[in-house]
Image (cartoon, rainbow, N blue to C red):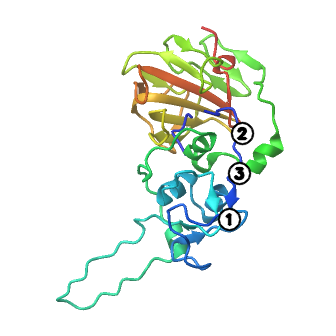
Amino acid sequence: MVVALFAGGCATPVSAPVSDRGGSASGRAAPSSTPRAGFYIVRPGDTLYSIAQRKGLTIRDLVAWNQLADPNQLEVGTELRIASPDAVVVSPVNIDGPAVEVKPVAPEAATTLPSLKQEPKGGKQPYSDQAWVAAQNATVPSIAAVEAKAASNEPGKPSAVRPDGARTVDGVEWSWPVGGTVFSGFKDNPRKGLDIAGKPGDGVFAAAAGKVVYSGTGLRGYGKLVIIKHDSNYLSAYAHNRQLLVKEGQTVEKGQKIAELGSTDSDRPKLHFEIRRQGKPVDPVNYLPER
């Protein structure tokens, strides 16, 4: 889902292929075509995204519950867990008292339980475009929708540059997230963003108003990360923070403090800042006001 922000950073997300080699993402082959309660058996044509949409889940939960080392490879016949491992709570039975009947939770009920905010059991995921999409949970448009748009990666023309330093591009009002010096630009940065110098504890501010769709540490190489969705086209990412001050689902205003600058998963204190348009990284300098 998250936070995010995150090497193939310019590629458009694609559907995860399904193969027929047998086996399971959790290391166990499905015993039959009938899944156990709380599980789902992968069928031809399934993708992790389509299963998450059909079952009302997030990609991140499916990856965590099944300890998927490579979310891009699903095999036909794989038995996937579609309910939280903590969804069924068994109470201890007093052997001196009357018998207690423990009823299993039906799959339908298990999938409606609120998802747990916890570290993925498989640990941090290595960076890939798919992992970046997973960090955003289900807030990213479907693959079909992205392909249908086939939009250009070029930013729109700025409609206004305000005296206070804000700049409006494509209807989004942007400002700088920190006040430090840029020491690695978009073209030189392998992750296609800006690296901005700063001191540990410096404030990191939302570059534009929006909704926090990821806040966490689940993406390797980005440390403590925040991702903000601004509209149907734009996301911004803020990486390597020392402390995160916002939670997923929270609405933030432009200029609101969302984190403290740090050096998590980095060799020096800095903010790695990205802007993504329809899932593709774009040069933030084309959106931020001139200094």
If you read the primary sequence from the N terminus, does the residue marked by circle 3 or circle 1 appear first?
A: 3
Q: Is residue 135 above or below residue 105?
A: above
Can you name the residue that lies furthest to the left here? 96
Quarter of the image containing the C terminus?
top right
Q: Which amino acid, mark 3?
A: Ser
Q: Is mark 1 on a helix, strand or loop?
A: loop
> Can residue 30 be seen by looking at this rendering?
yes
Q: Position of residue 289 (x, y in %)?
A: 64, 14
Q: Is residue 191 above or below residue 65?
A: above
C-alpha gap between disc 1 and disc 2 = 25 Å
Q: Which amino acid, mark 2?
A: Thr
Q: Which amino acid, mark 1?
A: Asp
Q: In which quarter of the image is residue 92?
A: bottom left
C-alpha gap between disc 2 and disc 3 = 10 Å
Q: Nearer the viewer, mark 1 or mark 2?
A: 1
Please name the residue that numbered disc 3 is placed on: 15
Mark carried by residue 20 = 1
If you read the primary sequence from the N terminus, does the residue marked by circle 1 or circle 2 appear first?
A: 2
Q: Is mark 3 on a helix, strand or loop?
A: loop
Mark carried by residue 230 = none
Q: Where is residue 99 in the image (x, y as percent from the top left)?
A: 27, 90
Q: Is mark 2 on a helix, strand or loop?
A: loop
Mark carried by residue 12 = 2
Q: Position of residue 126 (x, y in %)?
A: 52, 40
Q: Where is residue 18 in the image (x, y as percent from the top left)?
A: 68, 59
